[in-house]
Image (spheres, rainbow, N blue to C red):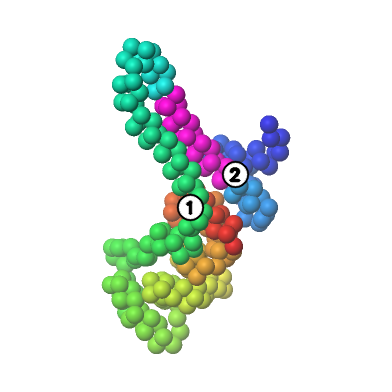
Amino acid sequence: MNNNPTSELLMQYLDGDLEGQPLEALKIRLESDNSLKEEYQQLLLARDAVKLYGLKEKVSGIHAEMMRELKPQKAQQGGSIISMFRPVMRIAAVLLLLIGAATIYQFLQVSSLAVFEKNFQPYTIPETRGAPAASPLADAFKNGQTGKVIGLFKQLPQASAEDCFYTGNAYLQEGKPEEAISLFLLVQQKNAINQARIFSDDTEYYLAMAYLNKGQIDQAVPLFEKIHNHKDHLYHDKVNDWFMWRLWLLKKKL
């Protein structure tokens, strides 16, 4: 039995059993304690391994049940029953091999660009009734004119946080993560100076995605961990356990 209090807290957190002040305290620690983050990721991987093992056990159980049913019939019907079940047993054996191979395949094939392309969804401006007239730049972004957005941005005498956010997303959609990163960081700087939260959650998520696209895993992971650990974050549902497990694999490949 694991008597480590921290590990027990992490297990309770993974199971959704941690509440109140202990939950908030653990979230704060996960943001600042790198060794705790590493242990958390290892527990996530272990849980996925247990799930995989459980699936293998189910297949093995089916195989064992088939063999128990086969034995009494074997004496009565001879080789015909064995011949009938041989294809089924072959399928079960192949399935077990495929499950093990799938785990190895995930490690070998995972890449920052592959994870990005599988999970990236372009930002869309939500429809709001009674909203004031949008700027030409925002209109161009809403209409999917990413090249026009970038052109309009370059002509602005002074860009707002909103202009930077939309143009950062335009660059990201154009496959230019480095330019996108610069603009998302600028949004955060403007918010810090003005003590504002304009596109705060959106900027964190798309900045993390831009880092992922550029292959800067060490910069992307802390942002994704923050989103994953805060259930009230706008993008929490997009950063699930499976996504975090693939990020952990990416870090191991560095």
Magenta: main secondary structure:
helix
Image quadrant containing the N terminus: top right
- Which residue, given by chain and number where applicable, does mark 2 sit on? 43
Q: At label 2, which amino acid type do we have?
A: Leu
Residue 189 % position (x, y): 55, 73
Which region shows up in magenta? 44-64
Q: Determine the image quadrant of residue 174.
A: bottom left
Q: Residues within 10 Å of mark 1 (few under 14, many from 20)?
A: few
Q: Residues within 10 Å of mark 2 (few under 14, many from 20)?
A: some
| Mark found first going from the N terminus, 2 or 1 | 2
Residue 231 % position (x, y): 50, 49
- Please indicate, yes or no, whether residue 132 appears anywhere in the rendered image: yes
**In the image, residue 81 above or below residue 191:** above
Q: Nearer the viewer, mark 2 or mark 1?
A: 1
Residue occupying image coordinates x 41% and y 27%: 62
Between 9 and 60, the residue placed more toward the observer is 60
